[in-house]
Amino acid sequence: MQKSKQFKSGFVAIIGRPNVGKSTLMNQVIGQKIAIMSDKPQTTRNKIHGVYTSNDSQIVFLDTPGIHKRQSKLGDYMNTVALNTLNEVEAVLFLVDVVEGIGGGDRYIIEQLKKISTPVFLVLNKIDQVHPETLLPIIVAYKDLYNFAEIVPISAMNGNNVNTLLEQVSKYLPQGPQYYPDDQVTDHPEQFVVAELIREKILHLTREEIPHSIAVAIEDMKVQENGVVYIGAVIYVERDSQKGIVIGKQGSLLKEVGKLARRDIENLLGSRTFLELWVKVKKDWRNQERILKDLGFRHDV
Ligand SMILES: Nc1nc2c(ncn2[C@@H]2O[C@H](COP(=O)(O)OP(=O)(O)OP(=O)(O)O)[C@@H](O)[C@H]2O)c(=O)[nH]1
C-alpha cells in the first residue's frame, strides 16, 4: 500500500456500558480494513480492540475496562488507571444505546469523563432500531450532561454511518508512525506498540544524530507475580558510534528513553511496567532477511 507522507496515527478509547455494541462496532470496522488480533487473552488491563489502517492513517482502538466499574477499593485504583489512559489518547468514543436511553451506567461514565480533557465523541448506536425523529430529543438530553466534541449516530450492526465516524476520528489524529504493519495477524498486539513507542523516543531524543536505521525488538514481555509487566527490549543500531549515542554519557540518554517510554507504555497497557533496554550493534541488519523477519515490524527501510 502506498503510504502518505503525512501519515497520522493515534490511540482511541472505546467506552460504554455493557451491551451498547462496542464489540459489534469493532467487528464492523475490522470487516472493512484491519490488522486482525488474536482472541488470546491479553495480559494487561487495557486491551487493544483492533487496528484500522488506511492509506493515510492508523487508529489503534483501546478497551479501558476500569472506567465502567463502580467505586470500590479496587474500583478506585482501576478508575485512576483508566482515567490516565483516557487522558493520553487522542479521542474517546463514548458509545450509548439509543433504544435503552440514558441509564445510571451512562451517567456514571459521564461523571468520569468530566475529569479528563480529551475530546469525547458521543456515538449513538443502534439507530436501525428507532425512528429518526426520536434521535433529536436523545441528543439534546445527552448534550445537557456533557460538552461532546462530536456527536455521531451509527448502526454498528449494519454499518450505517461507521465510515463517517472513522473520518471524524481521523481529524483528531496527530502525525505519527504506523504502529502495526498492514493486515498483520498477531498474538501479541501490544508488542508492536511497545516497540514503536521506544523507537519513537530514541528518534526524538537523538534528533538527527541517529538515522532511521534503528529497530526495536521485544524479547520478553510477561506479567510478574507482583502484577508488574516486565518488558525486555533490544535496540538494534548499525554502528558502534550509534551505540554510544543511544546510550549517552553514563547511560543518560538510554535512561531518559526508558523513562519516557515507560510512562507511555503504562498508560497504554494500564499496568505498572518494568522496562529493561539493551543496545546491540547488528551491522547491516537491514539487509539480513532473517533478522528482519525476527523483528517482524516496520522500520523505515
Ligand atoms: N439492532 C442493533 N443491535 C446492535 C447494534 N450494535 C450491537 N447490537 C447488538 O447489541 C448486543 C450487544 O452488542 P456487543 O457488541 O456485544 O456489546 P458490547 O458493548 O461489546 O458488550 P460488552 O462486551 O458486554 O461490553 C448484541 O446482541 C448486538 O448484536 C446495532 O447497531 N443495532
Image: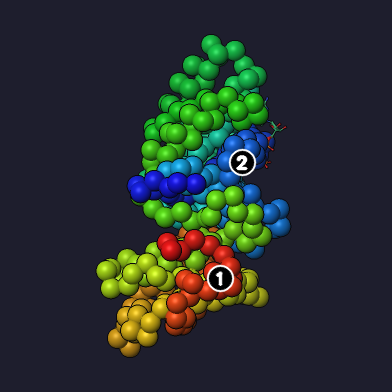
Where disc 2 sits, the SS reads: helix
Which marked residue is nearer to the observer: mark 2 or mark 1? 1
The answer to which of marks 2 and 1 sits earlier in the sequence is 2
SS state under label 1: helix
The image shows residue 240 at horizontal and vertical percentages of 37, 85
Q: How is the image coloured?
A: rainbow
**Residues packed near mark 1 inside 10 Å, few (<14), some (14 to 19) or many (20 plus):** few
Residue that appears at 38% across and 82% down: 239
Q: How many marks?
A: 2
- Which of 27/216 is in front? 216
Badge 2 is on which residue? Answer: 30
Q: Residue at x 32, y 80 (%)?
A: 245
**Label 1 near ligand 1 (CB < 8 Å):** no
Which percent across, then down, holds residue 290? 59, 73
Instruction: Name the residue that disc number 1 marks.
Output: 289
Q: Is residue 22 left or right of residue 178?
A: right
- Camera sees residue 139: yes
Q: Quadrant of residue 45?
A: bottom right
Q: Residue at x 48, y 22 (%)?
A: 139
Q: Position of residue 230 (x, y in %)?
A: 57, 74
What's under tag 1, amino acid-wise? Glu
